Image: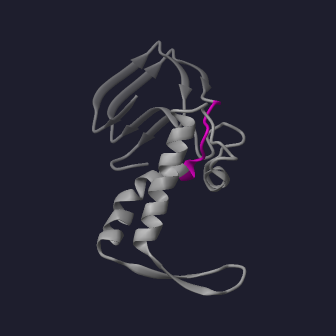
């Protein structure tokens, strides 16, 4: 249950199970009553870490930089070597990685294929299959995202 700017909310006799981040998340709610709810468990079959979500959300920014023909200087953390890389290359690689994970997880067997996509496995695999960030049952917050 997620909402923004809600009024007179009553949540009663609900069983929550298989949620990832929050069973209930309400921002700027006025007059909230929660009673007789049961929280069974959150999900324990999450194949990717939260970084995968961040990769998906950053796409519009990468696309913009690609369209602007932006280039950036990267420094290799081991050798100290400086390389010029285009946003187009980074964006295209990001899109390919997201598509590879989708292919493996959604269209495949539910996990990232380590042999077929080793870079994606290294970046996004969730070895413990549980949410790797904050997990809330009831998250009640003021205006704006929590």
Q: Residue at x 60, y 32 (%)?
A: 110
Residue 142, image x, y percentages = 37, 46
Q: Nearer the viewer, residue 66 or 61?
A: 66
> Is residue 3 on the magenta stretch?
no
Residue 95, image x, y percentages = 44, 55
| Side of 144 where 135 appears, left or right | right
Q: Residue at x 72, y 80 (%)?
A: 78
Can residue 144 be spotted in the picture? yes
Rendering colour mode: one colour
Q: Nearer the viewer, residue 109 or 125?
A: 109
Task: Give the image quarter of residue 45.
Answer: top right
Residue 52, image x, y percentages = 53, 50
Can residue 137 be spotted in the picture? no
Does 94 sit above or below residue 90? above
Does 100 sit above or below residue 35? below
Question: In which quadrant is the N terminus drawn?
Answer: top left
Q: Nearer the viewer, residue 21 or 34?
A: 21
Magenta region, residue range: 44-51
Most extreme residue toward the front is 116
Does 65 sit above or below residue 97? below
Q: Residue at x 35, y 71 (%)?
A: 65
Q: Main secondary structure of the magenta part?
A: loop
- The mark tally for this picture is 0
| Side of 143 where 146 appears, left or right | right
Residue 128, image x, y percentages = 72, 39
Q: Residue at x 48, y 54 (%)?
A: 96
Does 16 sit above or below residue 102? above
> Is residue 47 on the magenta stretch?
yes
């Amino acid at each position: 249950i997620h909402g923004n700017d809600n009024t007179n909310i009553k949540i009663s006799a609900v069983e929550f199970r298989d949620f990832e981040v929050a069973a209930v998340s309400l921002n700027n709610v006025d007059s909230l009553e929660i009673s007789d709810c049961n929280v069974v468990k959150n999900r324990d079959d999450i194949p990717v870490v939260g970084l995968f979500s961040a990769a998906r959300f950053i796409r519009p920014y990468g696309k913009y930089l690609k369209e602007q023909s932006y280039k950036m200087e990267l420094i290799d953390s081991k050798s100290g070597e400086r390389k010029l890389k285009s946003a187009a290359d980074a964006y295209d690689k990001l899109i390919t990685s997201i598509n590879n994970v989708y292919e493996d997880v959604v269209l495949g067997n539910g996990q990232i294929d380590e042999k077929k996509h080793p870079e994606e496995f290294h970046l996004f695999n969730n070895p413990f299959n549980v949410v790797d960030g904050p997990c809330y049952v009831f998250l009640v917050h003021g205006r704006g995202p929590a």
